[in-house]
C-alpha cells in the first residue's frame, strides 16, 4: 500500500468521546439504546438526545451500521455498528467484524465525513481476540481507503495501553508489508 494511505491512519490512546473528528464509531448493541463500555460512554457524553434518536432508528443488526447526530460530543455524527460476539470463530465472526468497518466507512463517505475515530470493536465484553480483531480492522480499513477518498483520516482510539500497543504493532507491520 502507498505511503499516502499510511498517513491517513493513526492510533491514539484515549477517550473516543473527546476526539476532534467528524464522526466517532460506537461499538453498540443491536438495540442501539446504550450499554456498557464504549457504548455507555458515548451515550453519557452525547446526552439524552442521542438515546431519543436511537429509539427512532429501530436497532441495527450485527455487522451493519447506522448514523445519528453527535449532540453534545465534539463529533458531528455517531456511527453505530454492532460487532459480533466471539464464539470461537466458527460463526462468521471475522466476516461480521470486517463488515462493521466497511459499513461504517461507507456510511461515513456517504455523509461527507472527512475524519473518523474507531474503537476496538468487539474486543471488550464481546470477547473477540484482540490481535485477530486488530488485524481485521487494519486490513479492512486499509482496503476501503485504497479505493475511497473519504474519509481522509481514520484514527483507531484505544482505551488502554495494552490495546494501543497491539494496534501500533499491527499498523506498523501493515505499513511495512
Image (cartoon, rainbow, N blue to C red):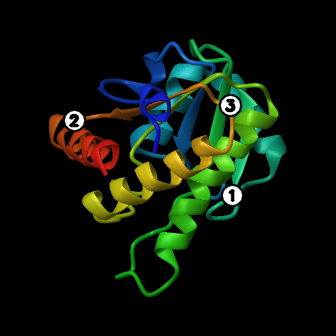
Q: Residue 114 appears in which quarter of the rendering? A: top right
Residue at figure coordinates x 71%, y 24% from the top left: 49
Indicate the position of residue 154 as horizontal and vertical percent values: 50, 31
Quick check: 78 above or below 170?
above
Label for residue 150? 3
> Would residue 84 appear left or right of 115 to someone viewing this image?
left
* Residue 102 in the figure: left or right of residue 59: left
Q: Is residue 82 above or below residue 47?
A: below
Q: Decide: marks 1, 2 in contact (CB < 8 A)?
A: no
**Mark 2, secondary structure of its residue:** loop
Give the quarter of the image for residue 123: bottom left
Residue in front for this viewpoint, 109 or 55: 109
The residue lying toward the viewer, choosing from 145 and 122, is 145
Of tags 1 and 3, the one toward the viewer is 3
- State how far apart marks 1 and 2 are (Cα): 26 Å
Which of the two residues, 162 or 8, is positioned nearer the viewer here? 8
The residue positioned 42% from the left and 33% from the top of the image is 6
Q: Secondary structure at mark 3?
A: loop
Q: Would you place residue 34 above or below residue 73 in this image?
A: below
Q: CB atoms at circles 3 and 2 under 8 Å apart? A: no
Label 1 element class: loop
Q: Residue furthest bottom?
A: 90
Residue 104 seen in this snapshot: yes
Q: Which residue is mark 1?
A: 64
Amino acid at each position: 500500500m502507498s505511503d499516502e494511505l499510511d498517513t491517513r491512519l493513526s492510533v491514539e490512546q484515549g477517550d473516543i468521546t473527546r476526539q476532534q473528528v467528524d464522526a466517532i464509531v460506537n461499538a453498540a448493541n443491536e438495540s442501539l439504546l446504550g450499554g456498557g463500555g464504549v457504548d455507555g460512554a458515548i451515550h453519557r457524553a452525547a446526552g439524552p438526545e442521542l438515546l431519543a434518536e436511537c429509539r427512532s432508528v429501530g436497532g441495527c443488526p450485527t455487522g451493519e451500521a447506522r448514523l445519528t447526530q453527535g449532540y453534545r460530543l465534539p463529533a458531528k455524527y455517531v456511527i453505530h455498528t454492532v460487532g459480533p460476539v466471539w464464539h470461537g470463530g466458527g460463526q462468521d465472526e471475522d466476516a461480521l467484524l470486517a463488515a462493521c468497518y466497511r459499513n461504517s466507512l461507507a456510511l461515513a463517505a456517504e455523509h461527507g465525513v472527512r475524519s473518523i475515530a474507531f474503537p476496538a470493536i468487539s474486543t471488550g465484553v464481546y470477547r473477540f481476540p484482540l490481535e485477530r480483531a486488530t488485524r481485521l480492522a487494519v486490513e479492512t480499513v486499509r482496503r476501503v481507503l485504497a479505493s475511497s477518498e473519504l474519509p481522509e483520516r481514520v484514527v483507531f482510539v484505544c482505551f488502554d495501553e495494552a490495546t494501543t500497543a497491539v494496534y501500533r504493532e499491527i499498523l506498523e507491520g501493515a505499513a511495512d508489508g
